[in-house]
Amino acid sequence: MAKQKPQIPAEIEDHRDRQWRRDEARPIETAFDAERFIEHVGFTACMTDARRPGPSLYVAVCGRRDAVMPRNVQKDEEASMTWRLKDELVRRGKVYYGKLARGKTTFLAPRLIPYFHAVWGVRKAEEKHRLSKNARAILRVLRHEWEMSTWDLRDESGVTDRKAFTQAMDELQAAMIVVPSDVFYEPKFTYIWTLAVGRFPEALTRRISRDTALREMARCFLAGAGLTIPGELARVTGLSRPEAGLGNRALVAEGYATMLGPGTYRLATTPTVP
């Protein structure tokens, strides 16, 4: 018999509607709106829908709790708008964007960057042991040129196989070393890539302990979620369940959260809505 999924109380769903902009009264229509949303929630997925937990820029653009991505996203106005906002946010460079843990495209507010980097970032001294040969080849070129298109970077690095190049770029993004800085659709589609530390030097050079990072990631999610059920924080952030538990229990220890049962944590007090 399948295990029944824990139900989210109605008042918690209402809290999430307010915090995650699942509300038609406050639509996200501009890059400025999107930046304010990302700063408020701390971190958010880009194109996930109601079938995945956590905040989502797409859901916030839709302004609906039950927003589901259609199969034909090219003809969907809300999906297209989210994609255009993503491109503009990448160009503006005020929030962090990249494929992070488990290949999830994620936006980070600058204040959350040090915590994510403490968990997944690869520092220069570790690159030889933690990055693949292809990733290091791409990185050598990018450090010399500082900014390059996908096509030029493939040629200059010698990683010309499309699949191998994509895997290496995903690896560099997950390590929080490389980020897209622009995107062009004409004459052909290409991202422009740059070093993340060039855009966020202070955030990416701060030294944060892993325990502190886990606690602050858990705090950020719980502030918006109101309550977290077993496995939810891990799914949203890409953390392992044991590490998500460490973060949540640290919040209980300081009185920020209460533990209702195994893997279930609730805010001790509901924060005010800005």
Image: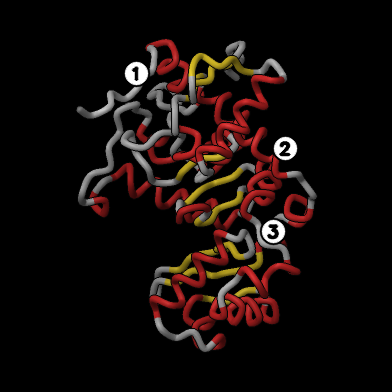
Q: Of residues 253 and 139, which is closer to you in this image? A: 253
Looking at the image, is 268 positioned above or below residue 148? above
Q: Is residue 186 left or right of residue 245?
A: left
What separation in Å lies between label 1 and label 2 (alpha carbons)? 30 Å
Element marked by disc 1: loop
Residue at the spot 46% in from the left edge and 22% down from the top edge? 16
Where in the figure is residue 203, as x and y percent of width and height? Answer: 74, 50
Looking at the image, is 189 positioned above or below residue 74? below
Using the image, tell me which numbered label, if any, was put on residue 199: 3
Q: Of residues 194 and 172, which is closer to you in this image? A: 172
Quadrant in the rendering for residue 272: top right
Outermost residue, front side: 1
Residue at the spot 40% in from the left edge and 69% down from the top edge? 185
Using the image, tell me which numbered label, if any, was put on residue 7: 1
Disc 2 vs disc 3: which is toward the camera? 2
Q: Could you tell which of marks 1 and 2 lies nearer the N-terminus?
A: 1
Element marked by disc 3: helix
Where in the figure is residue 82, as x and y percent of width and height? Answer: 40, 46
